[in-house]
Image: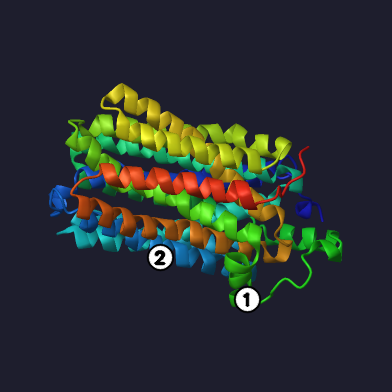
Amino acid sequence: MAFRERGITTNLGQFLLQTVEVFFVGLIIGMERDVLPAMSQDFGVGRSAFFFLATFAISFGLVKGALNFAAGGLSDRIGRRRVLFLGWIAGIPIPVLIFFAQNWWWIVAANIFLGVNQAFTWTMTVTSQIDLANSHQRGLAVGINEAVGYLAVGLAGLGTGYMAVSVGPRVALLSFGLAVITLALLLIPWMKDTIHWVHAEHAQQQPQRNMENFPVTAWAAFVQVSFRNTTYRALCQGGVANKIADTLVWVLLPVFFRSQGMDIVRIGWITGIYAAVWGVSQLWTGHLADRIGRKPPVVLGFGLLAMGLAGTALVHNFVAWIGTATIMGLGMALLYPNLIAAMSDIAPPLQRGRILGTYRYWRDTGYAIGGLVLGLVAQWSHGILPAIWVTSATVALSGTWIALTVRETHAPA
């Protein structure tokens, strides 16, 4: 049937609907990026209570990581669109809890719902766009998905920063969040479930291409991807490392910049530039990897990210921090879509949701690991600079691991 033919151009209407959806997904997580950490003292967080501050990222990472894995298997059974709908329903309490928050534990609770929302919605949009694309377009598909999502993260962080100044942080996040969720839900009836394209792809492939003896149970697949397969294992740890870096940007850098005399709007510009460069650059970094292979941009990306983090610790003014944020965003753009594209290169079609779910479990559990480790480092050292250096070293080591152990997963075009 025609609707089962793969290719971005062939399925452009459905691909664009998924693209709009991921823009809304990015807006929801982006609305927290600037306002909440910078204004955390208004919610009862002490000036040096870095670990307590990080608890909202820990709750988010634990929930999102676990549900990323569940979402992959669930979507293989009931379809992508139903899981997407459940994710948006779970998003409704987020702005409401922030608006009525009496203390920081309300924010932690809101981020539990944020973890559910992001796990179900972002996982489904990227999985659906990979389903729709041909095999030689997967890097492009993931690049477009992540580009639009993280462009939205940057725009939301900057926009809610200005809104918080004019109407207050609670009203800004309530009105912004409910408007985005409503628009996202209104689009779902127009979307088709891409599980049909998956079955068509499976039927077209030769049996030997479907990884001989690949585990069919959820737990066996999790163990295979997480620990036994050398390539999968290295890519999963890379996902953890880049989210540790993103945790630093989300949780601690706004507080660090605030301590350096930056106001909330300038902080929004720094974190917004990071996310926007990360987002926009993925429009070409994913396609680049389709042409030259996944490994070179991934390894270069880790190197640039480590350099940008080190630079952030070394410089001391707004313009210089804009520069280091740009370098970090470019590094993320090179590594981020191509890690997941590499995973999809070697994933059997009928197991793709489960395998990508396992990768996204580890990647987004990186928020919890990052919140725990960096929060403790900052708490014990009574400052954020040591946490920045720990993050830079972690990213550099992760890139080295991939450079030394991963073989190219995609034949250059």
Q: Which residue is mark 1?
A: 220
Marks 1 and 2 sit apart, C-alpha to C-alpha, by 21 Å
Residue 365 as seen in the image, left or right of residue 188: left
Tell how many labels: 2
Q: Is residue 125 visible?
A: yes
Q: Crowdedness of circle 1 by 10 Å Cα count: few (<14), some, many (20+)?
A: few
Name the spot of residue 275 as percent of width and height, x first. 42, 37
The residue positioned 61% from the left and 32% from the top of the image is 284
Residues at badges 1 and 2 in contact (C-beta under 8 Å)?
Answer: no
Q: Please name the residue shown 76% across and 53% down the image.
A: 3
Label 2 crowd bin: few (<14), some (14–19), many (20+), radius 10 Å? many
Among numbered discs 1 and 2, the one appearing first in the sequence: 2
Q: Residue 278, can we see it?
A: no
Quarter of the figure with residue 19: top right
Q: Which residue is mark 2?
A: 63
Q: Nearer the viewer, residue 182 or 162?
A: 162
Q: Amino acid at mark 2?
A: Val
Type of the residue with mark 1: Ala
Q: Position of residue 32 (x, y in %)?
A: 31, 47
Residue 157 horizontal side relative to residue 194, left or right? left
Q: Nearer the viewer, mark 1 or mark 2?
A: 1
Residue 352 figure quarter? bottom right
Query: Is residue 257 rendered to the left or right of residue 132?
Result: left
Name the residue at 66% across, 43% down. Answer: 294
Image: 395 above or below 230: above
SS for tag 2? helix
Q: Nearer the viewer, residue 374 or 173?
A: 374
Residue 377: image location, x then y, percent:
27, 53
Q: Is residue 61 left or right of residue 405?
A: left
